[in-house]
């Protein structure tokens, strides 16, 4: 269904449909060694009977082909990308330059520690910086994404109970939790039990009290949460959870709202993950790349993964494995070091005051947009918001829903916000701190113009987008039966 040309929507043929037999995109110099007969050089079973049907395209045509495709991309470098929960902020170019420096990018994980002291020092420093930002005792850098961090933390929590001779099978999370929370529970063999949220988006403490018991290993909470509000009951929540001997886990995907303002360790969190690719910038999307460092408080420290990067008494850096209670290794080699280099550059580039500015401006931008849109769109949760907010379009009378509005935004060069999550029929808008007031105003103007348009000409909105190579795809079919491979007829 993504073969757009067959749908007649696009002027861009597939690479298999351009060129002609015998065309060739490489210029090799004349052979000056004896030719090898391939059938002598390879075992017979490895040789295909037929030559594969590869594209035969000249060099200039292939350059143009990929350049044209590149122009169809949508990225945060080109346009506003208010994708709620994903923190699609500007990724400073300096981070990319630093991560690409041969001193970092040409290293091999099997190199001797003595050869890679600079990288080890950077990793040591980034884990200490993250521990300070979290207000927690120690951080592991191994997990490769937020979801991987959740799983690592649940394994640490399981190890903690096992060490105490206890077995706890239940993990709680508010009903607004990200889908990775129940998935991580399933991966760790825990029973996932949702806790009700109140109408104002905060945890229903009575429901929490009713559900947390001696069989509860943890409450996984996102704060600020996925509906965009900071739950100020967090200290009470921590007390309720701790009173039953359970752990408070923070899904740290929304750290962009609280850097330097408060620290999870200070509001009762026992362990958490960071999404460094969100909070501390890295070009991300489509599944990677990322890093999901996990921080823990004192009583969970001994269960952290090994090896841990350490600073030795003589001032050199290395790897330590001396943690007998450790859950072991959760990632090959040392984690996503390229992403961690970017995180370090970002944290050090901004410093303590800069990180505080990040969060204050992210929160200001979200609340500004909410204030500009509240007269035409329903805001189901009362302000103030953290760094993102939820809006519910109410245009059923015109046959228009959140999906149509998201598609119409594409015509204005704006990436659709997150749709239909964490509540039905919503758009979740996260502007981030890196957008100028002019961009925020333009987005608000476009949203208000779409609201007017729905009343005057709903058909145009319902049939959007009108400016893209492909108008509408069958999204369910695209997810269930992706067909993105060309096959010869
Ligand atoms: C992004 C996100 C996750 C998952 O993080 P990944 O790095 O994508 O694995 C978990 N929880 C919330 C609230 C998120 O926004």
Image (cartoon, grey):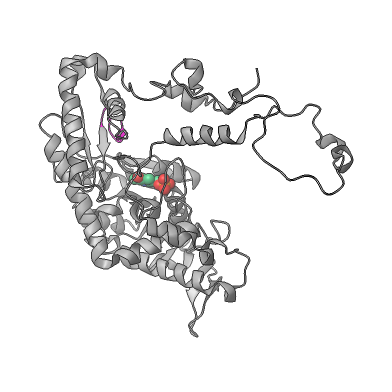
The region drawn magenta spans 417-426
Image quadrant where one finds the C terminus: top right
Q: Closest to the observer: 380 or 302?
A: 380
Q: Closest to the observer: 394 or 280?
A: 280
Q: Closest to the observer: 16 or 246?
A: 16
Residue 437: horizontal and vertical position, in percent?
A: 18, 46
Can you tell which quarter of the image residue 24 is in?
A: top right
Is residue 182 highlighted in magenta? no
Figure check: 91 above or below 371: below
- Residue at 29 percent of width and 64 percent of height: 350
Is residue 422 highlighted in magenta? yes
- Residue at 25 percent of width and 53 percent of height: 257
Q: Give the residue furthest to the right.
A: 40
Residue 75: horizontal and vertical position, in percent?
A: 38, 40
Q: How many marks?
A: 0
Instruction: Kindly report the secondary structure that dominates the magenta region of the rendered protein.
Output: loop
Q: Is residue 231 visible?
A: no
Figure check: 28 above or below 456: below
Q: Can residue 124 be seen in this view?
A: yes
Can you tell which quarter of the image residue 259 is in?
A: bottom left
Residue 430: horizontal and vertical position, in percent?
A: 26, 43
Residue 203: horizontal and vertical position, in percent?
A: 23, 45
């Amino acid at each position: 269904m993504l073969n757009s040309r067959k749908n007649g929507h696009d002027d861009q043929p597939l690479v298999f449909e351009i060129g002609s037999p015998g065309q060739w995109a490489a210029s090799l110099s004349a052979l000056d060694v004896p030719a090898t007969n391939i059938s002598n050089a390879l075992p017979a079973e490895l040789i295909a009977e037929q030559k594969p049907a590869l594209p035969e395209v000249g060099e200039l045509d292939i350059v143009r082909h990929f350049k044209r495709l590149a122009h169809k991309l949508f990225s945060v470098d080109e346009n506003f990308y208010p994708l709620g929960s994903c923190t699609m902020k500007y990724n400073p170019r300096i981070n990319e330059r630093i991560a690409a420096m041969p001193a970092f990018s040409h290293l091999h994980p099997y190199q001797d520690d003595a050869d890679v002291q600079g990288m080890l020092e950077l990793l040591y420093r980034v884990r200490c910086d993250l521990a300070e930002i979290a207000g927690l005792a120690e951080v592991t850098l191994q997990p490769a994404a937020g979801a991987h961090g959740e799983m690592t933390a649940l394994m640490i929590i399981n190890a903690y109970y096992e060490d105490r001779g206890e077995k706890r099978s239940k993990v709680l999370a508010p009903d607004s939790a990200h889908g990775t929370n129940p998935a991580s529970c399933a991966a760790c063999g825990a029973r996932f039990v949702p806790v009700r949220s109140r109408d104002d988006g905060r945890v229903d403490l009575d429901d929490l009290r009713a559900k947390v018991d001696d069989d509860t290993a943890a409450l996984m909470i996102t704060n600020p949460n996925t509906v965009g509000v900071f739950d100020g009951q967090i200290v009470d929540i921590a007390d309720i959870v701790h009173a039953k001997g359970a752990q408070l886990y923070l899904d740290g995907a929304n750290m962009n709202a609280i850097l330097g303002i408060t620290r999870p360790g200070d509001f009762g969190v026992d362990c958490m993950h960071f999404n460094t690719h969100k909070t501390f910038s890295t070009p991300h999307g489509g599944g990677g790349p990322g890093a999901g460092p996990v921080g823990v408080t004192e009583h969970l420290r001994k269960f952290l993964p090994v090896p841990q990067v350490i600073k030795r008494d003589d001032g050199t850096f290395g790897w330590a494995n001396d943690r007998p209670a450790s859950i072991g290794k959760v990632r090959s080699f040392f984690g996503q070091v390229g992403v961690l280099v970017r995180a370090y550059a970002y944290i050090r580039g901004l410093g303590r005051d800069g990180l505080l500015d990040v969060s204050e401006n992210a929160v200001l931008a979200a609340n500004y947009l909410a204030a500009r849109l509240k007269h035409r769109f329903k805001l189901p949760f009362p302000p103030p918001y953290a760094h993102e907010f939820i809006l519910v379009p109410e245009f059923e009378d015109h046959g228009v829903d959140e999906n149509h509005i998201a598609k119409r935004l594409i015509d204005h060069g704006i990436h659709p916000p997150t749709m239909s999550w964490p509540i039905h029929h919503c758009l979740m808008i996260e502007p981030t701190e890196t957008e100028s007031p002019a961009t925020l105003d333009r987005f608000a103007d476009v949203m208000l113009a779409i609201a007017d348009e729905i009343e005057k000409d709903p058909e145009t909105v319902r049939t959007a987008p009108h400016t893209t190579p492909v108008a509408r795809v069958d999204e369910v079919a695209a997810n269930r039966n992706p067909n993105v491979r060309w096959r010869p007829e």
